[in-house]
Amino acid sequence: MKPIKHPLTLFLIGATGDLAKKKILKALYTLHQEGLLPEIFNLVGNSRKVMTHHEFEQFVYSVVQPKDESEWKKFAKSLYYLPGDVDHRQTFEQIRSLHESFATCGNHLWYVATLPSLYIQTVRHIQAARMGKAPCGWTKIMLEKPFGTDVASAHELDEALTSVFKEDQIFRIDHFLAKETVQNLLVFRFANGIFEHLWHRNFIDNIQVTASENLGIDGREIFYDQTGTIRDVIQNHVLQMLAVTLMDEPKSLQAQDVRQKRHEVLANLRPFELDQIDRDVKFGQYIAGKVNGNIVRGFLEENHIEPHSQTETAAALRCFVDSDRWRNVPIYIRAGKRLESTVTEISIQFKEPPNAMFSELDRVQRGNVLTLRIQPNEGVVVRLKVKKPGLHLQLNEVPMQFGYRNEFQMGLVEAYVKLIYDAVQGDPTLFPRSDGIESSWHFVQPLLDYKMRAKFRPEAYKAGSWGPSSFTQLIKQDKRQWIQPSVEM
């Protein structure tokens, strides 16, 4: 990562929000500490909260908690704040006036970290305030998922974006694509022939994705009740990870080649037929239970949740990719809130060869499993069968693992640091493309339609469990079972 050379102004819309506090401001300060921000850098924060430049500076200080005061003072000089509602065009006129007072000319990056329902209005006001172009540099825009709430709204958002910005100016964020293990998939698969030759329906029995959290929805109640698990993680994070896992080898590492291969996977997802959803998709909603030894309340008891809400807080599904490589290989996905543990990983279950010689020792012979741990404790685990030491021949299963922190003895580059840097440098490799997003929405749209039926009811499950019993039955009907998260990691 080389230092950014040209002057840069970053307009952070939603500067006091949850995402800004947890990720964006810390990422920007990390870029500053690493000497990657340009000498002329301005951060213009905006939100509805009324505060002065100095109060905003104190707010950012409390977020990043700097250890080096001299470094902090250098960064603090770049901070500006302007309160205002993004629903009002005047807010953006004031932002433009503030920026003009800097008497600097360079590149502009809009980072829109508001509620997704405000995206279109924000983009239109940027255009109306004549801030869609920089007089002596480029202008780009970054937006957080979800990109719409269904096929129609995603298409409407895309039309609004492309009416102001060209496609190469738009950076849609799905931060899971910037996780080290997801990035490493390209190297792991295509630079190691031992695996790439086996990455095929002839050798793989099934693929399982777990994207679970034991956390609830504190602070996001209204958003989550309007969203649910399908929209919140499956349409975006899960499908993007799958695309990287299953994609064919691109011609090169150029962004257009990598993104095209990801898109082909998403475009080949087998659509759900409404009469098959009862069999292939299960929906759950947590009730009171115990998490980490503590009693927690159910979803309907959370603040601001309607007493008869039918929002799913977890979902499990079986799906397929209709391509030559993956035809008829089942993909099992489970994701949601208040599940047993917080973990995201992809497990590849290989087919078991017909080795009858060990049938007396191991009646239930399962294929080897390769697990890609996305978070926490990023790494890779392969489970191998070996002879257990002793006088008799007994089989045992042992893990061979690679852990990033163990191997490299260093902290990983945080996803948002990488994404902001890449957007400034104009590298779209780790950002979803508009056609891939549209394909993802087309894939889940039948599930959204299914949830609108009068008889729809998510199945209750205790907080702290792995979901309702239907999740187990979903995979059990294929005479398979869920691969539990790897304790080795």
Image (cartoon, rainbow, N blue to C red):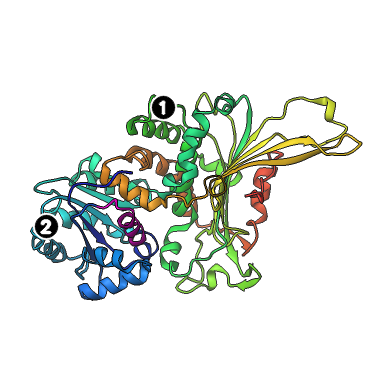
**Rendered view: 400 above or below 109:** above
Percent across and percent down for residue 172 are: 32, 47
Look at the image and tell me whether residue 265 can be seen. yes
Residue 48 picture quarter: bottom left
Point 22% across, 64% down: residue: 86
Q: Is residue 386 left or right of residue 81?
A: right
Q: Secondary structure at mark 1?
A: loop
Q: Find out whether residue 32 is within the magenta segment.
A: yes
Percent across and percent down for residue 228 are: 47, 57
Q: Find out whether residue 5 is within the magenta segment.
A: no
221 or 23, nearer to the observer: 23
Across the whole image, how many numbered discs are drawn on residues? 2
Q: Main secondary structure of the magenta part?
A: helix
Q: Earlier in the sequence, mark 1 or mark 2?
A: 2
Look at the image and tell me whether residue 322 can be seen. no
In the picture as drawn, the residue positioned furthest to the right comes out as 391
Which mark identifies residue 129?
2
**Rendered view: 376 above or below 260:** below
Percent across and percent down for residue 135 are: 8, 48
Q: Are marks 1 and 2 in contact (CB under 8 Å)?
A: no
Point 69% across, 44% down: residue: 481
Which mark identifies residue 250?
1
Please identify the quadrant where the N terminus is shown. top left
Specify few, some or many for label 2: CA neighbours under 10 Å numbering under 14, 14-19, or 20 or more. some
Percent across and percent down for residue 72 are: 30, 66
The three-letter code of the residue at mark 1 reads Pro
**Rendered view: 151 above or below 216:** above
Q: Is residue 470 left or right of residue 172?
A: right
The span picked out in magenta is 25-37
